[in-house]
Amino acid sequence: MSGAAETERDQAVLMDDYEAGELAIEFDDKEPEDLLAWAFERFHPRLAIVTSFQIDTLVLIDMACQINRDVRVITVDTGRLPQETHDLIDRVRQKYGIEVEVRYPEAAHVEKMVRRNGMNLFRESVEKRLLCCHIRKVLPLQKALEDLDAWVTGLRRDQWATRSNIRKIDLDHDHGGIVKLNPLADWTHDDVWAYVREYDVPFHPLYEQGFTSLGCVPCTRPIQPGEDNRAGRWWWETNAPKECGMHCPIETGGFEHEVHAILGDQVDLKNLRD
Ligand code: SF4
């Protein structure tokens, strides 16, 4: 079966935009646990929480473990993460008795990207930063999502302008039409931290050093008083999206040529442009 035909089959089995819209309305005022319980019922085991170990997805892991300890948790190790993130992965494994599926970028892609562009290419231009995010994060995520019918994220509407309209249930047309669940869409920063305190959820120690968003070491720093929560990401860039392409399509701005040079025939330029 061709990739296109397989995608059509999978979408037919999952749900269409009409049903997704109906469910989004139905669940919009429901608790995150209600949505997770429904998702387990409908999609497990082709359902996973995808996390970079920001606090929001830690809350979701805690909630999911109350429902089903077989919860699948997937993360992408870009190769540039801080030691504290690796330590937290093990704390989560131990506290909840769950496995964490750690996915990695293709070594050959990283090698070629670095050989052609240097270790710290992300400092040179927005295009090269997006290239690095694409090779190290977006492609491993895309590969992980190919085996799922639904993924759970910690996105919230109050995080960033590009996230202000997210629904709790959506079809992810950027990833083959699988279902994307955002159970905390209507939660606030304070709601999340209240839950963490009440249920003693493990959290990343860099939050206590002024970080409000976590990621790769060279691209993340603490914010200053009065700065936006996403200001600690790629702070040297101006007029660029504070996104890596995992959660929303990015105007690529011309890195297709370099991606093509690195990935060769494997590259799907349509995906890059969508
Ligand atoms: Fe590369 Fe920085 Fe993106 Fe990490 S956050 S993948 S180091 S550009």
Image: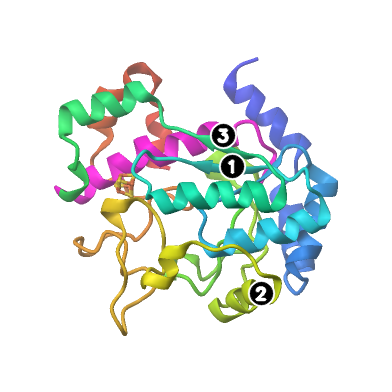
Q: In the shown orientation, is residue 239 left or right of residue 202?
A: left
Q: Which stretch appears magenta? A: 124-151
Query: Vertical placement of 115 versus 119: above or below?
Result: above
Q: Residue flagged by tag 1: what amino acid is it? A: Ile
What's the residue at 59%, 55% (across, down)? 153
Ligand 1 near label 2 (Cβ, under 8 Å)? no
Residue 73 falls in which quadrant of the image? top right
Q: Which residue is labeled 3 in the image?
A: 144
Label for residue 195?
Answer: 2
Q: Quadrant of the C terminus?
A: top left
Query: Vertical placement of 244 versus 26: above or below?
Result: above
Q: Nearer the viewer, residue 110 or 158?
A: 110
Q: Quadrant of the N terminus?
A: top right
Which one is earlier in the sequence, the residue at label 2 or at label 1? 1
Q: Which residue is labeled 1 in the image?
A: 74
Query: Vertical placement of 65 versus 187: above or below?
Result: above
As drawn, which residue projects farthest toward the bottom?
226
Task: Reply yes or no: does residue 126 show up in magenta.
Answer: yes
